[in-house]
Amino acid sequence: MKITPLPVGFGAEIDGVDLRQADAGVAELLRSTLLEYGMLVVRGQSFTPPEQLAASRLFGSLETFPTVRGQLQGWPEIFRVASRPQDGHVEVGRYWHSDGSFREEPTPISFWYSEVRSEQGGDTLFTDLQRAYAELRPEIRQEFEGLSTAHRNGVVHPLVLRHPKSGVPALYLNIGLTAGVLGYSPDHSRALIDAVDRHYSRDGATYRHRWLPGDVVVADNLHVAHKATPITPATRRILHRTTIRADGVIWYEGAQKQAA
C-alpha cells in the first residue's frame, strides 16, 4: 500500500489496496492515515452494497437512514446522493459542512463510493478545519475560543472543536444549518458565518475531487468539511455514502468490537 499526501496540505491518496480484502494490518494503517491526514482518496474500487458496508466498518459502526424514494431497499446504511431524484437525494450540501453536525454527538467519519460518474459537474470540495483554525489571526482565535453555535434544530456545538483523539482544535461550523452564534445578534451571527464561509474557501485551502467510477473518499468530519458543487439532471451521477456513528468510531475504546 502506497500513501501519497495530496498537494493541498491535507488528505492522502492511497494506492495498491483493495478495500474488500483489507487485513488487520492494512485496516490499522488506513485508520492511522485518516487520523493524520483527515481524508483518504482510494481509486479503482468495486463494491456491492454489502462489500461497501464491510469496507466502511473498517472505521467503525454505521448510522442508518430512512428508506425513501431513490434509496436502496434493504440497505438503510447507504445514503444515495444523486443528480436525479429517482436515483437518490438531490441538491444536497451545496455549502461547507461536516456530515451529521446537527447531531448532539456529531458524525465523525463519512465514506463515499462513486457508483455512477457524471460526465460534467458534481465535483466535491474539501477544506481542512484544523488548518482553518490555525490560520486565523491570533485575536480572532481568542474571540472564537469562547463561542458556541446553534443549529436550526437547537443542537449546540463549540465553534472551536477539539478532536476527541488528537486534541487538535478545528474551526467547526455548518454554513447552511447554523441558526446563529450564542450571545450574538442575528446580524452579528450572519457576519461571522459569512466570514467563516469565505475563510474556508480561501485561496489554496481547498481540494476539488473529480469523481471517477470506483472512487472512494473517506473523510474525518471533525478534521475536514466538504461542499457539493452544482450538477444538472441532464447528466447522471450517483454516490453511495455511509457514515460512522459517534458511539462506535475507531478512536473510541471498543469501537472495533461494535463495528464487527
Image: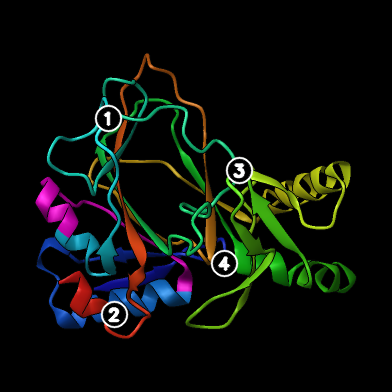
**Marks 1 and 4: which is nearer the front?**
1
Q: CA distance from mark 1 to mark 4?
A: 38 Å
Classify the position of the C terminus by image quarter: bottom left
According to the picture, the residue beneath numbered tag 1 turns out to be 68
Q: Position of residue 30 (x, y in %)?
A: 30, 74
Tell me if I can see residue 92 in this picture.
yes
Q: CA distance from mark 1 to mark 3?
A: 22 Å
Q: Circle 1 sits in a helix, a strand or a loop, which is it?
A: loop
According to the picture, the residue beneath numbered tag 3 turns out to be 177
Q: Quadrant of residue 82?
A: top left
Residue type, label 3: Leu
Q: Circle 2 sits in a helix, a strand or a loop, which is it?
A: helix
Asked if residue 39 is among those painted magenta in the image, a careful observer would answer: yes
Q: Position of residue 61 (x, y in %)?
A: 26, 66
Foreground of the two, 249 or 140: 249
Tell me if I can see residue 18 in this picture.
no
Residue type, label 4: Gly
Give the mark nearer the N terminus: 3 vs 2: 2
Marks 2 & 1, CB-CB < 8 Å contact: no
Q: Position of residue 8 (x, y in %)?
A: 56, 61
Give the mark nearer the N terminus: 4 vs 2: 4
- Residue found 30% across the figure and 55% down from its top: 63
Q: Which mark is residue 29?
A: 2
Foreground of the two, 135 or 254: 254
Residue type, label 2: Leu
Specify start and end residues of the magenta stretch as a single range: 37-53
According to the picture, the residue beneath numbered tag 4 turns out to be 9
